[in-house]
Amino acid sequence: MRPLFSITLSLFIAVALCAQTLNDSLKTDILLRTYIESEQVPLNREVVYNVELRWQGDLSKYKIGAILEPAVNNLTTRGSGSSNKVHTAPDGSIQSTKKITFYFRPVELGMAYIDGITIRYTDTVLDQEESLISSRIGVKIIDPVSEPGESPLIPIVSWSFVILIAGGLIVFIYVRYRRRKEEQRLKELSERKETVEEKYLRLLKETINFTPDNIKDMLTELAHLLSGYFSECYNIPGTNLASDNLIAILTEKDLRDEEIERIKNFYARADLVKFAGEKVNESEFHQLYDTVELLLENQAKRRMNES
């Protein structure tokens, strides 16, 4: 008899504990609802996606975690907003609502999708953490609609007219600008003699035009142009001097030590490419080109200051 009583008592306690646990879980009455305001949205309108949480009790009953922007397909984010509302039901109970609204712009015609989101929250009464998961929602992106008071052809005609006028104006301004620049350049050349530095800066821009297929040849031309400048500027006989002999002569001229060092590095690299067959990439060619251009520009400034 005693064992039967013990078993009956144990079953009674277990049922009571299960009932208590079930009762506690029922206290977590938060509801999640996600929805879009329209299942078909024109291409030039916005998809409005709402996340709504509702529960019995005041706002402090649940602490809602950060609600991240959902992953989307065929949509881009425009912005979001949130609001909280508390009201009293006819039966006198307090109901709280938290609403987050996301605004998305359609990308192209067809179906667009908003993935489900996971919302984590804490029941401040029971001091326990829970989570809710929403489902994926699809929306159909349809043809754009006309704005109020607007004919469908008006935007096309208007934009075509604007583009035509703007294009004609740009071409007119560009042609007029280039003509004036050319006239100004010819006038300046006629009024004064072109300096050696100006001559070689012009030749640099006119003759050194590299492509991925002719970088090696252009580097040889670049070295030849620089040697020609030094030969003409400092009256050095011959333009085919070995780089070592040329540098030895230049050390006796009015060049600064850092310029001599840059010249040495330039010819050392150019000789390795020309005679040792080493390769040079576009980035390195740009650096070597900039070295020559900077040297000519500094020389031009020095000559101007001296005069």
Image (cartoon, grey):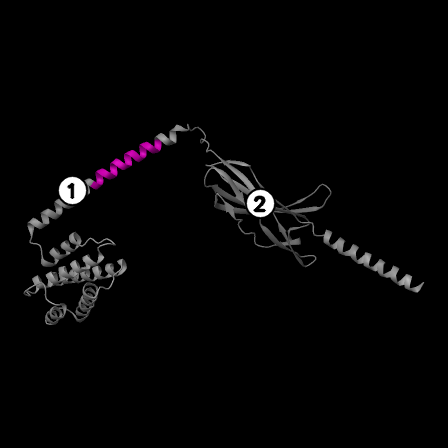
- Find residue 44 and report its horizontal and vertical position in percent: 45, 36
Instruction: Say above or below: 173 vs 263.
Output: above
For the residue marked with disc 1, what is the amino acid?
Answer: Arg
Residues under numbered marks 1 and 2 in contact, where contact means CB atoms less than 8 Å apart: no
| 233 relative to 158 in the view: left or right | left
Residue 108 sits inside the magenta stretch: no
Residue 83: which numbered mark, if any?
Answer: none
* Lower sequence index among marks 1 and 2: 2
Q: Residue at x 59, y 42 (%)?
A: 35
Label 2, residues with CA under 10 Å away: few <14, some 14-19, many ≥20: some
Give me the C-alpha separation between circle 1 and circle 2.
61 Å
Q: Nearer the viewer, mark 1 or mark 2?
A: 2
- Find residue 153 and report its horizontal and vertical position in percent: 39, 28
For the residue marked with disc 2, what is the amino acid?
Answer: Arg
Q: Quadrant of the N terminus?
A: bottom right
Which SS class for mark 1?
A: helix
- Find residue 190 and report its horizontal and vertical position in percent: 7, 49
Magenta stretch, main secondary structure class: helix
Instruction: Say above or below: 287 vs 145.
Output: below
Instruction: Say above or below: 286 vs 135.
Output: below
Reading the image, the residue beneath label 2 is 136
Viewer-side residue, 120 vs 205: 205
Residue 49 visible in rendering: yes
Residue 173 sits inside the magenta stretch: yes
Q: Quadrant of the C terminus?
A: bottom left
Residues drawn in magenta: 158-174
Q: Quadrant of residue 18?
A: bottom right
Reading the image, the residue beneath label 1 is 179
- Find residue 241 and report its horizontal and vertical position in percent: 10, 66
Residue 307 visible in rendering: no
| 261 relative to 28 in the view: left or right | left
| 182 relative to 27 in the view: left or right | left
